[in-house]
Image (cartoon, rainbow, N blue to C red):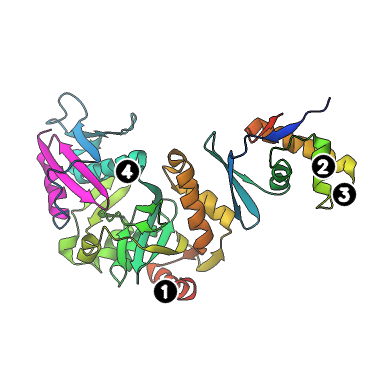
Amino acid sequence: MPHRYCQDGEDAVATCVLEDMVLLYHRPSGQTHMVISPVPEILAALAEGAALTASEVHGELSRHYDLGPAEEALPQIEAHLAELTALGLVRLA
Amino acid sequence: MNHALSLKIGPATFRIGSAWRQPVEALARLYADYPDAAGKVADFTVRLEPAGLFRRWLRPSIFITGDHGLADAAPMSLTHGLLAAEMGMNLQMALGWRRHLLLHAASVERDGQALVMTGESGSGKSTLAAQLGERGWRLMGDEFALLDLATGDVLPFPRLVSLKNRAIDVLAAEAPAPRMGPLLAATAKGDIRHLVPRSDAVRRMGQGARPALLLFPRFGHAAAVRGVGQGEVFMRLTQASTNYVALGEPGFAALTRFVRSVPARAIDFPSGEEAIAMVDRLWEELA
């Protein structure tokens, strides 16, 4: 079974866009993260309580963005989800 | 403590105690025009104590301590007692202040708007702020700018300006002698002389201003102006703040508001005069 990922709580992150980067203030840890695309988009795909697999995140993003060949994009999304999980911004559902 | 003095600088009240008379007398003279804080509850205590059992008398040596201290702070000579007291107050602010987002930055005000300048020690921000303070701007502080968490205004912390090495002569030529402190020669940071801010800066030390321009000055380079992206500004300001992490989300909100609303430039300059001309030009253009 592939992992399912969800955001770390509905209200866990405060977001602020600064030109071409996004700041994420993670309320439970008090840590500030500076991120760029596609991280904000991946987090947005997990909004409103969604619990998705990496493949479903890819499907959600490809509805809005041209991600190129799936065999290249999917491993990158998986890597980002693993990093975000390590940071505590995303958790396994 | 045998000798003590209470001081109010901006929103903060300090009680300085000393084993020796000299540092307290020097402070009392230089802070004579500041509001009387005697009997007020102090936010911080600074203590200047002998570094060892006999060091009150024998090669007197000061250990700076207080509510917040650094365990490995090097003792200082009694002849640098004034500097020790100033450092002690800075240390309390840097380690203990929580009411505002504290930025290691100089700030000056004109027409109700603030120019904030931040940079490493030696960047020239302190000297530039002091010079502007003698030339029609209100000096709000040369070391700490306090960002109000609710309003986003910059609040003053107009302590004595600490002039180092070459900056001493530059300001001695502009400011009247009674506002200059004694020369503290050969300290760990070189020669130091303190400058008392002008009386209007002291009188209006409770009055904040809306931040209108942020500069990252750098002294000793050919004149140049560079735009600074918001991401870089944010990162540099978190590094310049001693309490950003401690303040949590209100700090995040205040800092992001500042970064998004205040135009920022990095300026390189070879001399004070050129820096002042650049500031005037950028202020005209951006503030």
Q: Are marks 2 and 1 in contact (CB under 8 Å)?
A: no
Range of residues picked out in magenta: B1-30
CA separation in Å, label 2 and label 3: 11 Å
Query: Could you tell whether A50 is left or right of B246 in the image?
Result: right
Mark 1: which amino acid? Asp
Asked which secondary structure carries label 3, the reply is loop
Q: Could you tell me residue B87's position as x and y percent?
A: 28, 43
| Disc 3: which residue | A68
For the point 49% across and 75% down, the residue is B285
Upstream in the sequence, badge 4 or badge 1? 4
CA separation in Å, label 1 and label 3: 50 Å
CA separation in Å, label 3 and label 4: 52 Å
Q: Is residue B159 visible?
A: yes
Give the chain of mark 3: A
Q: Nearer the viewer, mark 1 or mark 3?
A: 3
| Disc 2: which residue | A58
Question: Looking at the image, is B12 positioned above or below residue B112?
Answer: above
Asked which secondary structure carries label 2, the reply is helix
Q: Nearer the viewer, mark 4 or mark 2?
A: 2
B24 falls in the magenta region: yes
For the point 84% across and 43% down, the residue is A59
**Residue B93, numbered circle:** 4
Q: Nearer the viewer, mark 3 or mark 4?
A: 3
The image quadrant that residue A47 belongs to is top right
Q: Nearer the viewer, mark 2 or mark 1?
A: 2
**Residue B280, numbered circle:** 1
Position of the C terminus of chain B by quadrant: bottom left
